Image: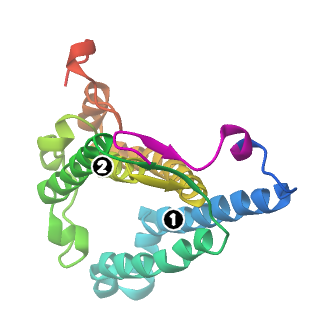
Amino acid sequence: MGKGKVTGALSLTSLIVPSNGKITVMLLRVAAIFFSVGVYGALHSAAASQAVKGWVRLRWGARAARWYRLAYNLVFTALLLPLLAVPAAFPDRLLYVIHPPWLYVTTGLQLGGLALAADATFRTDLWAFLGLKPEPKATAEELVVRGAYRWVRHPMYTGSLLILWAMPAMTLNSVLFYAALTLYIVVGAMLEERRLLTAYGETYARYRHRVPMLIPRIPIFGGKP
């Protein structure tokens, strides 16, 4: 493994057509990872819906609704542990390792993703996001379009994708897991768009027309930030 190289541990053929007749295990691996992420994502999105929040308020009152966001964060953070256990349950294979100088590029991408996510978090109400104070009512004046939100509509998601896919070492299980997470993030962003349109109306519609969802426009190619 020399400097400035991407070291691969598998050939393309061995990745597409598993050797030793282990196709069944491969299919089971793919199904288990995508199914588990799908179930987690469906529960995560459903619990974040206004319908469920409204049901909690009607069933248990305003006090329960006040702490719903905090409980939501704690529950789904805890559920990450069994989710992460699914890819870990299968035998894994190293696909590649990135070495300097390309390692500096991937590290830069990850730091950029972290900066995007951090900027987005602190430009919104951090304490409300964590569930430590009530969520403010959505109004046109409250729509955040500064900072990272000037470049993409969902900078937390964009930052997360950069962190995932710029990992300097990648295994078969991690590729499948990241692919499943990417699918969920895209679907989740599309579902969130509906809620934001309902909450902010024409203000968000104009913002959506002007700013891309996940991939920022690059000015040198004619895009306008």
Q: Earlier in the sequence, mark 2 or mark 1?
A: 1
Label 2 with label 1: CB-CB less than 8 Å: no
Lateral position of residue 31 relative to residue 44, left or right: right
Q: Is residue 8 magenta?
A: yes
* Residue at 27%, 49% in the rendered image: 107
* Residue at 49%, 54% in the rendered image: 170
* Residue at 48%, 62% in the rendered image: 45
Residue marked by disc 1: 46
Residue marked by disc 2: 159
Lateral position of residue 176 relative to residue 100, left or right: right
Model colouring: rainbow
Residue 148 pos. (x, y %): 18, 43
Numbered circle sitting on residue 24? none
- Mark 2 is on which residue type? Gly
* Residue at 51%, 65% in the rendered image: 46
On screen, 80 above or below 149?
below
On screen, 76 above or below 155?
below
- Mark 1 is on which residue type? Ala
User: In the orientation shown, which residue stands out farthest toward the right?
Assistant: 21
| Residue stretch in magenta | 1-15
Q: Quadrant of residue 134?
A: bottom left
